[in-house]
Image: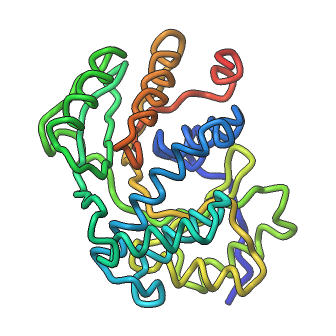
Amino acid sequence: MPRATLTPGRGACYPPRMSGHSKWATIKRKKGAVDAKRGKIFTKLIREIATAARLGGADPNANPRLRLAMDKARAANMPKANIDRAIKKGSGEDADAARYEEVVYEGYGPGGVAILIETLTDNRNRTAGEVRHVLSSHGGNLGESGCVSFLFSKKGSIRFERDAVADADALLEAALEAGAEDVQEADGSLAVLTAPSDFDAVRESLAKAGFTPVEAAVTMEPATTVPLAGEQAQAMLELAEAIEDLDDVQEIYSNFDIPDDEMARIA
């Protein structure tokens, strides 16, 4: 095939038209929040592992969702014993384990940004009340089902630190040959984007080619973004942190875009 050339993405942030989830993940790493909240992260990962095992079985080789959840747990340095116990809870070996259901909440944040909140809960009424309270306390509001989900599409995202990739064009070629849809560069990172069905195959192919990602997940990417600055940007970051602090929340997706210079000012 002809040698491909990597060019920066067309958008103003990483990746172009990226979700607030991706921006928020970058912010957390810079703040060092991962270590500070490791216990809460473990709780969320255990719920995801148990739910994945319940829905798709305890064999990660036959259950892509479980395999991805286990990879995330290992990346967070969760002990193997914790992972094994979570699988047993989900697969039914632990008869006393709580059973969680997936519920997605939709709403709006400061500046009218769209927000999707994925939860695993054993009490819908409790979780809905907590989500509604956090949104209303930070300048947002809970919406009806379907009010913002049409703005997002599911994508596989495999992210690499730009400085750690010696040959970006080689990554691009390997990704496209493996079936990726695009490779985008911005904010010091390279993002390989895939269709959800191709995510595992592309990730495994890149790993065999020697490319190690810092983050790999199936996420919700927005079609458009809403720029925020000043008080609205500050309020959105505070809202994202408050939502993530809720025990039942697994993931947050949004379409806000805060420019890097504004992020530096807030930080």
Residue at left offset 32%, top offset 14%: 137
Q: Is residue 246 above or below residue 179?
A: above
Judge from the rendering whether residue 46 lies leftward or rightward of residue 73; answer left or right.
left
Quadrant of the image containing the N terminus = bottom right
Quarter-of-image position of residue 165: bottom right
- The colour scheme applied to this rendered structure is rainbow
| Residue lying at the far top of the rendered structure | 231
Looking at the rendered structure, the number of numbered marks drawn on it comes to 0
Quarter-of-image position of residue 191: bottom right
Residues 16 and 40: in front is: 40
Quadrant of the image containing the C terminus = top right
Give x and y (percent) for residue 15: 57, 50
Residues 10 and 105: in front is: 105
Q: Is residue 84 above or below residue 13?
A: below
Residues 1 and 241: in front is: 241
Q: Is residue 262 above or below residue 197?
A: above
Residue at left offset 43%, top offset 74%: 87
Residue at left offset 69%, top offset 60%: 214
Give x and y (percent) for residue 90: 34, 71
Judge from the rendering whether residue 80 lies leftward or rightward of residue 163; answer left or right.
left
Judge from the rendering whether residue 149 lies leftward or rightward of residue 138; answer left or right.
left
| Residue lying at the far right of the rendered structure | 166
Give x and y (percent) for residue 140: 29, 20
Residues 91 and 102: in front is: 91
Give x and y (percent) for residue 132: 23, 26
Residue at left offset 38%, top offset 67%: 50
